[in-house]
Amino acid sequence: MVRLSTVALGLLYGLSNILGVVADSATLTDPAIDGPVGLGYAGINMTALLAAAENELGVNGTVTDNLPDDNYGAPGTTISARDLQKLQELRKRTYGRGIFGAIACLSLKILFPSKTATTGSSNYNQWNNPSFWSATTYMAPTCVFRPTSVDDISCAMKLITLSQADFNVVGGGHSAIKGWANTEDGVLIILSGLTGVKVKPGYAEVSTGERWGNVFTVLDQNKLMALGGRMSTVGVPGLVLGGGVSYLTNQLGFVADQVKNFQVVLANGWVVNANANANADLFRALKGGSSNFGIVTRVDLYTWPCPRGVYSGQLYFSDTRDYPKMFDAVYKYHTVGALADTQTHLISAFVYVSIPGVGGMHMGAFTAFRNISGSEVNPGPGPALQEIVDLNPTTKNTSTLQVRPYGTQAIELGAGDMNGLRQDMRDFSVYADNQLYKDLFQLWNETMIPKHGSKAGFMGTIAFQPITTKAVAAGTARGGNSLGLEGNTKTMAIINLTHQWGSAADDAAIIASLDEVLAKSIALAKARNLYHPYFYLNYARKQDNPIGSYGTASVNRLKAASNFYDPCKIFQCRVPGGFKIPGMSSC
Ligand SMILES: Cc1cc2nc3c(=O)[nH]c(=O)nc-3n(C[C@H](O)[C@H](O)[C@H](O)COP(=O)(O)OP(=O)(O)OC[C@H]3O[C@@H](n4cnc5c(N)ncnc54)[C@H](O)[C@@H]3O)c2cc1C
Ligand SMILES: *[C@@H]1O[C@H](CO)[C@@H](O)[C@H](O)[C@H]1NC(C)=O
Ligand SMILES: *[C@@H]1O[C@H](CO)[C@@H](O)[C@H](O)[C@H]1NC(C)=O
Ligand SMILES: *[C@@H]1O[C@H](CO)[C@@H](O)[C@H](O)[C@H]1NC(C)=O
Ligand SMILES: *[C@@H]1O[C@H](CO)[C@@H](O)[C@H](O)[C@H]1NC(C)=O
Ligand SMILES: *[C@@H]1O[C@H](CO)[C@@H](O)[C@H](O)[C@H]1NC(C)=O
Ligand SMILES: *[C@@H]1O[C@H](CO)[C@@H](O)[C@H](O)[C@H]1NC(C)=O
């Protein structure tokens, strides 16, 4: 029998000597790892801390297990990987999982009283609510931890690992899947206080509490550009760790491909860098491996000069008779223009919006983008995008095409991003094909619009995003990523479905129709030999296993990296949501 408070005390005692956790497992000996950083809390009075823990925890809950009583860390002992395994065992046998979250939260509250908030407090409601983009993803963690430094996260990670609590981390909160960036039990680490964008020669250090809008604003002030999200409101970390499609993707690949260095807090609390020279396996793993390896606290992004800004803006098409011409032009851009002028970009989104009283309307919402070269006299869309810009002159006067600083394009698009709606995102991939694009659009149109098009707040979008062979090659040139696309020999397209609506009562019916669209679309692409098995992680549906879609070679690298950097499988087992590495041994 073990008193739970003894467990908590053991964890807190362990704090003084936690650095042994993974080192003891004898696998993490890579000299390239920077090594432990100081906790920065040398002034802690352990006696007082433990007394407070004992007092507050007040749990005399008893746990029946067959483990020896005395292995949870006495003062001065090291908590070893073996002890941790025992804790994990204990965890499985205890009745309420919540107790582990409670232990972690209590410890955090003692160490970080102003950065830890529990249910009912105003900080809890403020930190865990408005920062959320999607109404479908709200959850109620035991506590919310809002760090403001890497040391805070390092210390919290040690406590969380030792306490075996569930936890999760949220960056910009733009995941649409419930549980992916939140947790019902345990600790939610909210990164919004971890801010900073520092311009350095050739790159920028971006803390992962940032969203793209501020990153680009700082870059604009320095007449620089970097790869990043196309909407200002989206968070930096989720987008980069899943790949990241940017305005500069045709030339330079995914956003992750243009990361120079990741700073990461591992499960044992160590702060390490991952780049081409240090921890190169972790570096590659993070380019697409999502939340499986650690908490990424900073991404260093390569920058390029942007002395004259870009020519870009929105184009709206509301005459549905033009749709066939629009698809022709989109297909041509995917297979010709995007390769001929890699400094261009096109978002081609086909939208249906419900309009109260009227029903609704179809609309093409395109974003055309081109980096302006040094010598150009009269900057315009250029030959690659001219055909797109010339489509449907009747609505051309509503376009926002103009010469502008790079970052203002993402800010213009971000202005349309709304918080608090019901959200669904999903995607699949095909090889570029004009007729297939048209048929996929019609399949979506027929399945969704008659049934759901007039529901309150309904807005549905099907978008076609090319990934050219040049984009893939740009990633390879930077040492490769985890996405498994190296074998591509022709342009593929990510088909991305995003839907919003107002009422939870409509969730089931809308999602059932979307599941039907996805299944039929994939079947159609397969029947024409145009299916590509890749699921882009950042829009993928919960059940679509995007990491599995990277292929065996990539999955094997990811498994090896996980085993090395997280040997106790904290990120596999204690983070309840997020896309996991398939085929890892069970928790
Ligand atoms: C309006 C909108 C526009 C978009 N535009 C683009 C676009 O232009 N290009 C593109 O590629 N994608 C785009 N996306 C998709 C986007 O990449 C994903 O939604 C992405 O998850 C957003 O990142 P986030 O930090 O906001 O997400 P979050 O929901 O905070 O996190 C997503 C996942 O990453 C994990 N995570 C978060 N922070 C960390 C961290 N520091 N360390 C480890 N794991 C972490 C979370 O636990 C979660 O599993 C867009 C999405 C929306 C809703
Ligand atoms: C630590 O806290 C204990 C209990 O509150 C107290 O008795 C002791 O004097 C403190 N030690 C220091 C060094 O402040
Ligand atoms: C917890 O157990 C101890 C020892 O059995 C006892 O002295 C104490 O009163 C108990 N506390 C509570 C809150 O039940
Ligand atoms: C959507 O489908 C309907 C028939 O179901 C058709 O009349 C309409 O033209 C389609 N919309 C577009 C933009 O093609
Ligand atoms: C954008 O154009 C500028 C001016 O010609 C150039 O210096 C810069 O390298 C370009 N950006 C990229 C990402 O190539
Ligand atoms: C755009 O052009 C159409 C057709 O020429 C015209 O009816 C409409 O008023 C114009 N809109 C704006 C915003 O200028
Ligand atoms: C997915 O579609 C949305 C519009 O609904 C768009 O903002 C986003 O950029 C698209 N992503 C890709 C990769 O095409």
Image: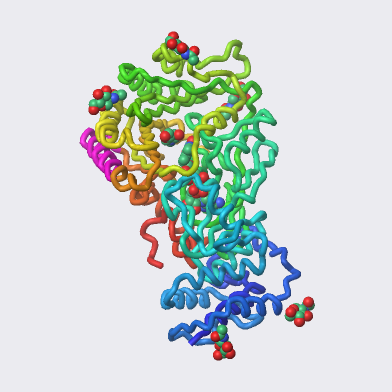
Picture quadrant where residue 457 is located:
top left
Q: Residue at x 63, y 79 (%)?
A: 55
Would you place residue 360 above or below residue 136 in this image?
A: above
* Residue located farthest toward the left when viewing the structure as drawn: 527
Q: How many labels does the image show?
A: 0
Question: In the rendered view, would you say 62 is above or below 495?
Answer: below
Res. 285 in view: no
Point out the stretch of residues depicted in magenta: 512-531
Residue 214 on the magenta span: no
Q: Position of residue 319 (x, y in %)?
A: 35, 17
Q: Residue at x 54, y 80 (%)?
A: 59
- Left of 6 or right of it: where is 184? left
At 74% from the left and 68% from the top, the residue drawn is 42
Residue at the spot 65% in from the left edge and 63% down from the top edge: 36
Left or right: 565, with 353 as reference point: right
User: Which secondary structure is most common in the magenta stretch?
Assistant: helix
Ligand 7 sits in quadrant: top left
- Please say which color scheme the image uses: rainbow
Give yes or no for residue 527 being in the magenta stretch. yes
Quarter of the image that includes the C terminus: bottom left
Q: Where is residue 549 in the image (x, y as percent from the top left)?
A: 36, 47
The residue lying toward the viewer, choosing from 455 and 7, is 455
Considering only vertical position in the picture, is 5 above or below 343? below
Where residue 155 sits in the image (x, y, percent)? 63, 64
Q: Specify whether residue 194 is in view.
A: yes
Q: In this view, does 486 lie above or below 545?
A: above
Locate residue 489, reporting x and y percent. Answer: 36, 33
| Left or right placement of residue 69 versus residue 556 in this view | right
